[in-house]
Image (cartoon, rainbow, N blue to C red):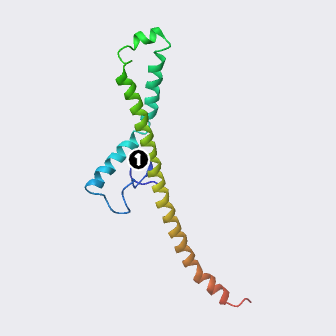
Amino acid sequence: MGGPGRGGHSNDVLTLQGHTPSGLKALWSALAKLFIRLRYLGLAGYALEWLLEACHSSHRLHKLLRHINTPKFHLLAISMVLAGHVAEHLHHEEEHHHQETHLAHLRSELAKRKLALLPRIGRAASVPCI
């Protein structure tokens, strides 16, 4: 069941069976792969936001982290959370695409086996029992 690439995924979101994207589709595919790899960025954003909010309740922590307790870092934390959510969504789409491809392959294999089994069943019914 494993294929090339990380996690056994042989196809990405935009790659069709046997076709590699080119031009704008290749750029989108590369960006999608980058976002998928950053799916844990949201957790880091939540941790940074928690740390920045903890500065409001602890004077010692506020003094220690005064260089990062700025609006820019708050915006960075929120952006990390949003990027993490987008990455997780793209990852789910990739997994869904992989499952659909695998299910289609299994259905075609099942159909082939049923067709191969039908002539045997027909011959067995035509042979008289002794």
Give how far across and how far down residue 38 sits, in percent.
39, 39
Occupied quadrant, residue 3? bottom left
Label 1 element class:
helix
* Furthest residue toward front: 71
When the figure is inspected, residue 79 is found, relative to residue 34, above or below; the finding is above
Give how far across and how far down residue 61 sits, in percent.
45, 12
* Furthest residue toward left: 23
- Position of residue 127 in the picture relative to residue 73 (left or right): right
Front-most of 112 and 13? 13
Q: Which residue is label 1 attached to? A: 6
* Residue at 40 percent of width and 11 percent of height: 64
Give how far across and how far down residue 16 sits, in percent.
37, 61
Q: Residues within 10 Å of mark 1 (few under 14, many from 20)?
A: few
When the figure is inspected, residue 60 is found, relative to residue 32, above or below; the finding is above
Occupied quadrant, residue 120? bottom right
When the figure is inspected, residue 60 is found, relative to residue 37, above or below; the finding is above
- Position of residue 113 in the picture relative to residue 78 (left or right): right
Occupied quadrant, residue 49? top left
- Position of residue 24 in the picture relative to residue 50 (left or right): left
Q: How many marks?
A: 1
Amino acid type, label 1: Arg
Q: Quadrant of the C terminus?
A: bottom right
* Residue at 62 percent of width and 85 percent of height: 122
When the figure is inspected, residue 68 is found, relative to residue 86, above or below; the finding is above
Give how far across and how far down residue 117 sits, in percent.
58, 78
* Furthest residue toward right: 130
